Image (spheres, rainbow, N blue to C red):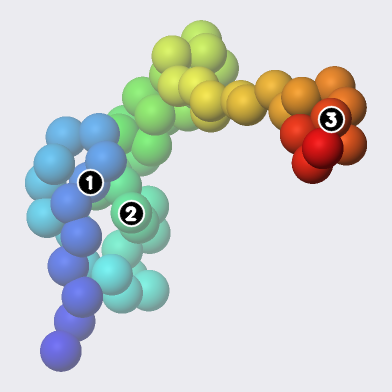
């Protein structure tokens, strides 16, 4: 059985096989759209700032 995933850009079904050259994307166009979004900082990874002194929390 072949796994099928949704293209992260357009949602089109993509078979997860070696012949799917741009997986998980359906095409080079969708891959470049996603790369452009990263380059323009449209995606972010949330950061958590830890307390300055962790020992204060233990007392």
Write the residue at 15% across / 89% down: 1
Location of residue 39 by image quarter: top right
x%, y% of residue 5?
A: 20, 60
Q: Earlier in the sequence, mark 1 or mark 2?
A: 1
Q: Is residue 49 left or right of residue 19?
A: right
Q: In this picture, is 34 found above or below 28? A: above
Which residue matches tag 1? 7
The answer to which of 42 and 19 lies nearer the viewer is: 42
Write the residue at 52% across / 13% down: 41
Write the residue at 39% across / 29% down: 34
- Marks 1 and 2 sit apart, C-alpha to C-alpha, by 6 Å
Q: Are marks 1 and 2 in contact (CB under 8 Å)?
A: yes
Q: Earlier in the sequence, mark 3 or mark 1?
A: 1
x%, y% of residue 54?
A: 83, 34
Q: Is residue 44 left or right of residue 20?
A: right
Q: Residue furthest front?
A: 59
Location of residue 48 by image quarter: top right
Number of the front mark, 2 or 3:
3
Mark 1 is surrounded, within 10 Å at the Cα level, by few (under 14), some (14 to 19) or many (20 or more) other residues, namely some
- Marks 3 and 1 sit apart, C-alpha to C-alpha, by 46 Å
Which residue matches tag 3? 56
x%, y% of residue 8?
A: 27, 41
Q: Residue furthest bottom?
A: 1
Which residue matches tag 2? 24
Q: Is residue 13 left or right of residue 41?
A: left
- Marks 2 and 3 sit apart, C-alpha to C-alpha, by 45 Å
x%, y% of residue 40?
A: 51, 10
The answer to which of 20 and 53 lies nearer the viewer is: 53
Q: Are marks 2 and 3 in contact (CB under 8 Å)?
A: no
The image quadrant where one finds the C terminus is top right
Mark 3 is surrounded, within 10 Å at the Cα level, by few (under 14), some (14 to 19) or many (20 or more) other residues, namely few
Location of residue 27 by image quarter: top left
């Amino acid at each position: 059985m072949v796994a099928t995933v949704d293209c992260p850009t357009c949602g089109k079904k993509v078979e997860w096989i070696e012949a799917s050259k741009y997986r998980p994307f359906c095409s080079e166009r969708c891959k470049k759209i996603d790369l452009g979004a990263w380059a323009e900082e449209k995606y972010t990874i949330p950061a958590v700032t830890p307390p300055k002194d962790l020992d204060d929390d233990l007392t």
